[in-house]
Image (cartoon, rainbow, N blue to C red):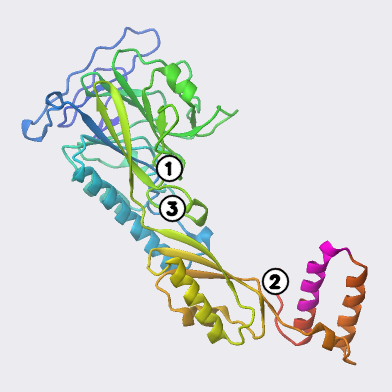
Amino acid sequence: MMIGGARVHPNSPCRGLPSQQTTILCPPAPGSPRPTVAGPGSLQPSSVRDWRARLMFTILHCADLHLEASFAAEGVPPAVGNWRRADLQAALGRVLGLAREHQVDAVTIAGDLYEHECALPDTVELLREQLGALAPVQVFIAPGEHDPFSEDSLYALSSWPANVTVMPPGRLDCYELAPGLYLWGAGYTPSADPDVLAGFKVDRKGTHLLLLHAALGSVPAGDGPYRVDARSLRSAGIDLALLGHLHRGQAEHSDGSYVYPGSPEPLCEQEADGEHLVVLVQVEDGACTTRALPVSQWRFRALQVDLSGSSSIEEAAALVRVALREAGAVDERTSCRVALVGVRRFELDLEALAAMVESPAYVRFDAKQSISYSVEQLAYEATLRGQLVRRFRERLASAPSNEHARLLTALGLGLRALEGKQVRPNESG
């Protein structure tokens, strides 16, 4: 078990704890006597918060930051991907700033703090510096699927500040945050049993929290992420589960048994409609209350601009600029997908259009428009083009109505090809 950089055997009394007023309770091996509460170790009075003098214990809970995430799958250019990764680091700073602002007693992180496949030594230094600066506030991390606890992980290979505890994988460990207040948790590793709560029941009176990177629902066959649900949490004696894995926040559940803060920032367009939060948890007299704190700054917009009637790329750019202003997509933390529709009367160069729009937002275009052709006039031409139009008109006359759009699209592609213009196989017009 890694505790603040020191390794502790799970079946021995917990010694050598960092300077903190946190007691770590090591679960017993099967059949062994119930453990006693271990002492807090060697404490430095100047760095200790006296939990016992406080009436309320406050936790800031977050998850799924995904530092060093790759955005290549989203089709963004490298410069935008670099900016987004830098902004995820800024999001970490905002989260920890909220912890200071609200004077919390502990910070919990439910996994996917970073991307294991992409993380660099600089990632470790950033985390060590930022998390260590919170001391004496304690930080508890339960690794997730994208930052699993393994022999080659940053968690295992790095020395962490004394106020940072990385939960090892496997069975649930218990940490006493204050008298009668316990935090249970486990890190994720691919070999872990997803049914982490199977046969588990808290073995002492008090208020019990669970920190875990877990999906909701029944446990599937084979390997997979940890799974929990409201029923299993109640059966285990958990008062509130502090979870990670879902990127759309769920700060309140009908029976109050769990919270998902979501990712601090939406990581793709599909996550734009969800909440991206940190959750402030307050425990007083055995009761848990939660408060959602919005933290995201990135926004995603999906717009549609009708180019019907526009006769030049300059007119098209003007229409796009108006649509962006009306949507509020005007800053550098906005990603906007613009669908260009309608029948146009000019050739459209998307790169030239993007240069003319000159928005601080990241704008990408989906060109679904087609060039305007007068089919009636072309049908009278004594040309190959006229012959093509006449044949398509015959097919349209006999085709069902639900086939007309497809046939007209095919006709438009054929006419463009006859004019010597490039036609891509997946082009829609």
Q: Quadrant of the C terminus?
A: bottom right
* Among numbered discs 2 and 1, the one appearing first in the sequence: 1
Percent of width and height locating residue 241:
38, 29
Which badge, 3 or 1, comes first in the chain's sequence? 1
Disc 3 designates what residue?
A: 266
Residue drawn at (46%, 15%), measured in percent from left and top? Answer: 199
Number of the label disc, if any, that sits on residue 427: 2
Q: Read off the magenta span.
A: 400-412
Where is mark 1, residue-wise?
249
Image quadrant in which you'd find residue 378? bottom right
Which marked residue is nearer to the observer: mark 3 or mark 1? 1
Say what secondary structure mark 1 lies in: loop
Residue 212 disc label: none
Spatial separation of the CA atoms under disc 3 and disc 1: 10 Å
**Mark 2 residue crowding within 10 angstroms, few (<14) / some (14–19) / many (20+):** few
Which residue is farthest left? Answer: 46
Eyeballing the image, is 356 above or below 22? Answer: below
Q: Residues within 10 Å of mark 3 (few under 14, many from 20)?
A: many
> What's under tag 1, amino acid-wise?
Gly
* Residue type of the residue flagged with mark 2: Glu
